[in-house]
């Protein structure tokens, strides 16, 4: 017995703790891959898909339907996108995400929009 625990219990707890740490490390590495320079916290994959859909002209309701989430959830994601990209408008978010290489060439750029 180890501290009132059996060896198998202690081994299981250590293994579980190590697995959680590895998963956390992998999540951090993934976030760093999508965190371009100049963005303190990179956009999550969900936020990237939302800003891409915004660039395709979809409203919050349309995005919610397409992704199977509530419109309020989309609104929260949009607020977070604005904060992370340092913008105030949807068109600015699309342009900034495009400039940073987060969204592709198939996204409609705002007409007559020269930059941020």
Image: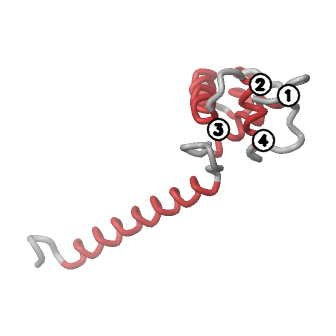
Q: Residue under circle 1?
A: 114
Q: Residue under circle 2?
A: 91
Q: Residue under circle 4?
A: 99
User: Marks 3 and 1: CB-CB under 8 Å?
Assistant: no
- Nearer to me, 84 or 44: 84
Residue density around tag 2, few if under 14, some if 14–19, many if 20 or more, within 10 Å = many
Colour option used: secondary structure
Instruction: Report, in whole angstroms, how far the alpha carbon at label 3 lies from the one at label 1.
Output: 23 Å
Q: Secondary structure at mark 3?
A: helix
Q: Is residue 96 above or below residue 45?
A: above
In the rendered view, does 30 fall on the left or right side of 58? left
Q: Earlier in the sequence, mark 1 or mark 4?
A: 4
In the rendered view, does 66 fall on the left or right side of 40? right
**Quarter of the image containing the N terminus?**
bottom left
Say the numbered circle drawn on residue 47: 3
Instruction: Report, in whole angstroms, how far the alpha carbon at label 2 lies from the one at label 3.
Output: 15 Å
- Nearer to me, 16 or 88: 88
**Is label 2 or label 4 in front?**
4
In the rendered view, does 16 fall on the left or right side of 81? left
């Amino acid at each position: 017995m180890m501290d009132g625990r059996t060896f198998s219990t202690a081994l299981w707890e250590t293994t579980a703790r190590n697995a959680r740490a590895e998963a956390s490390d992998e999540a951090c590495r993934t976030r760093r891959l999508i965190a371009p320079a100049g963005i303190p916290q990179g956009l999550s994959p969900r936020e990237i898909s939302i800003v891409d859909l915004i660039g395709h002209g979809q409203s919050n309701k349309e995005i919610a339907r397409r992704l199977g989430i509530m419109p309020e959830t989309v609104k929260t994601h949009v607020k977070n996108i604005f904060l992370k990209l340092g913008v105030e408008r949807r068109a600015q978010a699309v342009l900034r995400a495009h400039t940073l290489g987060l969204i592709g060439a198939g996204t409609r750029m705002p007409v007559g929009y020269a930059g941020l």
